[in-house]
Image: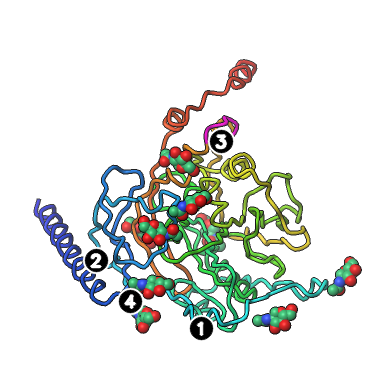
Amino acid sequence: MFQNRRTILLFICSIVFVQALYYIVTLQVKHNQTRLINFPSIISYEQGSDIEKIIVQDIKNVTYFNNTSISKESIRELKSSVDDLISINFTKPDPIIYNSLPICNFSISNNDSSIYKVTINKDINPFNIIEKHHGFDLHIGGHWFPKTCQTEQRLAIIVCYRNREPHLKLFLDNIHPFLKQQQLDYTIFIVNQHGYEQFNRAMLFNVGVIEALKLYSFNCFIFHDVDLLPEDLRNVYKCGEKPRHMSVAVDKFHYRLLYSTLFGGVTAFSVSDFMGANGYPTIYWGWGGEDDDMYLRVVKKLKKSITRYPVSIARYKMIRTLNHTSGKPNPDRYTILYSKYNYDHDGLNTTNYKLHNIVFNKLYILINVTLKEESFEQIRMRLNIKKRETKKPIRKKKV
Ligand SMILES: *[C@@H]1O[C@H](CO)[C@@H](O)[C@H](O)[C@H]1NC(C)=O
Ligand SMILES: *[C@@H]1O[C@H](CO)[C@@H](O)[C@H](O)[C@H]1NC(C)=O
Ligand SMILES: *[C@@H]1O[C@H](CO)[C@@H](O)[C@H](O)[C@H]1NC(C)=O
Ligand SMILES: *[C@@H]1O[C@H](CO)[C@@H](O)[C@H](O)[C@H]1NC(C)=O
Ligand SMILES: *[C@@H]1O[C@H](CO)[C@@H](O)[C@H](O)[C@H]1NC(C)=O
Ligand SMILES: *[C@@H]1O[C@H](CO)[C@@H](O)[C@H](O)[C@H]1NC(C)=O
Ligand SMILES: *[C@@H]1O[C@H](CO)[C@@H](O)[C@H](O)[C@H]1NC(C)=O
Ligand SMILES: *[C@@H]1O[C@H](CO)[C@@H](O)[C@H](O)[C@H]1NC(C)=O
Ligand SMILES: *[C@@H]1O[C@H](CO)[C@@H](O)[C@H](O)[C@H]1NC(C)=O
């Protein structure tokens, strides 16, 4: 009893405190517009909820893309933890100086592949050592841009994540030097799926895009598995006219493309292509299906083809020496995939999540969310997916 009352009291106090703090910060920002940028890390969102109360809009300097539902997210509740309140500047290049610089031109000038071969660091170092390696010239949040030239793109690397810290360490230790050498303006986002819901790789990518666009006008997104490390510098992390499948040749698969429509692992999308496809699907819980769905979105909704760098360049090492258990394969993935459901009815604008916190680490931005899981029945009802007729005969045969 006593415990309960204390908890409730604490809870009320912290809500009052957070609101007071929020009020003060808002006032301060209004007073001194360029000084403080406050992130909505104390706020939970639920997209598509009917409570319309947008309170973060004015306190952030944000480029929203007006043609999506991103600016329409509504806020449901304030979180009770003050620790999560982060005030920070997302460092942007000074436009006046930056515009006077020459355009960066990392280019491939030589056929000799040995020059571009990346030496992969396979030692799992603690975060503070990785920071010593690569953090000295990073802006907070794993953001870097060249100082001597201006980049044409602003790249967000979106990594889906759950409980794979050794892989994350290897990823960060290797990806930072790789991207710096390519002279890119890039930021690393790690989107963590908290909770016991089944893993939803594709929905985490959507979350990454939605949250990233609140910080900076990214115009190129690379969606990345945490266990893939690029092996060749000519595999340039840029977006082009078409969505690109990056992880063409993976060591685990003997550097061969498994099938021609493969679109998993690492993919690159310009912001307009991503919006045009209505983002990734949200309806694949557990392992498999979402990458093939995205391929179909590109072909059928966006009406484009995908592109790839040559097999000799788009090479990756898959980290598999560490304990890794894949999620449970989703038994319904083919039913959804081949159902011809309407891509307008699921994707970026049906991404439902609760944002716990955003943490600006030196090496990356952590976005920590819980996703709202739908059962297959709910998905079927919502998207009008029919049960597959082919299932019945197969079952009859087996019996
Ligand atoms: C917002 O960003 C733009 C360009 O990045 C800048 O010109 C403007 O002063 C900023 N406004 C605030 C309130 O920080
Ligand atoms: C988006 O809309 C807001 C107002 O709703 C406007 O101020 C802003 O300029 C628009 N941005 C673009 C890129 O059109
Ligand atoms: C929305 O997109 C359409 C086509 O892509 C474009 O013509 C229009 O200007 C955009 N509107 C805004 C407000 O950005
Ligand atoms: C925020 O940015 C402004 C201008 O770019 C700078 O003067 C200030 O020191 C920055 N604040 C922090 C906390 O980094
Ligand atoms: C870009 O490449 C051209 C020649 O290809 C070179 O003259 C120029 O210095 C390069 N710019 C930078 C910023 O490296
Ligand atoms: C690259 O290799 C091709 C043949 O494989 C050769 O014709 C070409 O001259 C080489 N280019 C350079 C820059 O070495
Ligand atoms: C792998 O898992 C086993 C048992 O769960 C554990 O003892 C071992 O330390 C793990 N290895 C690594 C590299 O995490
Ligand atoms: C999502 O966006 C598409 C356009 O890409 C639109 O046609 C559709 O109605 C939207 N769906 C929802 C549920 O808002
Ligand atoms: C994500 O948020 C939950 C709930 O606040 C918290 O328990 C968990 O530790 C967070 N995860 C990470 C990786 O920060």
User: What is the span of residues highlighted in magenta in the rendered image?
Assistant: 337-342
Question: What amino acid type should be assigned to the residue bearing mark 1?
Answer: Ile
Task: Residue under label 1, please give it.
Answer: 97
For the residues bearing labels 2 and 4, Cβ distance under 8 angstroms = no
- SS state under label 4: loop
104 versus 390 height, above or below:
below
Task: Residue under label 4, please give it.
Answer: 34
Between disc 4 and disc 3, the foreground one is 4
For the residues bearing labels 4 and 3, Cβ distance under 8 angstroms = no
Main SS class of the magenta portion in the image = loop
Q: Residue at x 29, y 64 (%)?
A: 58
Q: Is residue 311 on the magenta stretch?
A: no
Label 2 to label 1, Cα distance in Å? 37 Å
Residue 351 on image: x %, y %: 42, 46
For the residues bearing labels 3 and 2, Cβ distance under 8 angstroms = no
Q: Is label 4 within 8 A of ligand 1 (CB to nearest ligand atom)?
A: yes
**Residue nearest the observer in this picture, 368 or 112:** 112
Label 4 to label 3, Cα distance in Å? 48 Å
Label 2 to label 4, Cα distance in Å? 23 Å
| Nearest to N terminus: mark 2 or mark 1 | 2
Question: What amino acid type should be assigned to the residue bearing mark 3?
Answer: Arg
Decide: few, some or many residues near mark 4? Use Cα within 10 Å; few <14, some 14-19, many ≥20: few
Task: Residue under label 2, please give it.
Answer: 82
If the image is split into quadrants, where does the C terminus sit? top right
| Nearest to N terminus: mark 4 or mark 1 | 4
Q: Residue at x 29, y 60 (%)?
A: 56
Question: What amino acid type should be assigned to the residue bearing mark 4?
Answer: Thr
Residue 96 on image: x %, y %: 49, 81
Q: Is residue 340 on the magenta stretch?
A: yes
Task: Residue under label 3, please give it.
Answer: 333
Q: Does the rendering let one see residue 368?
A: no
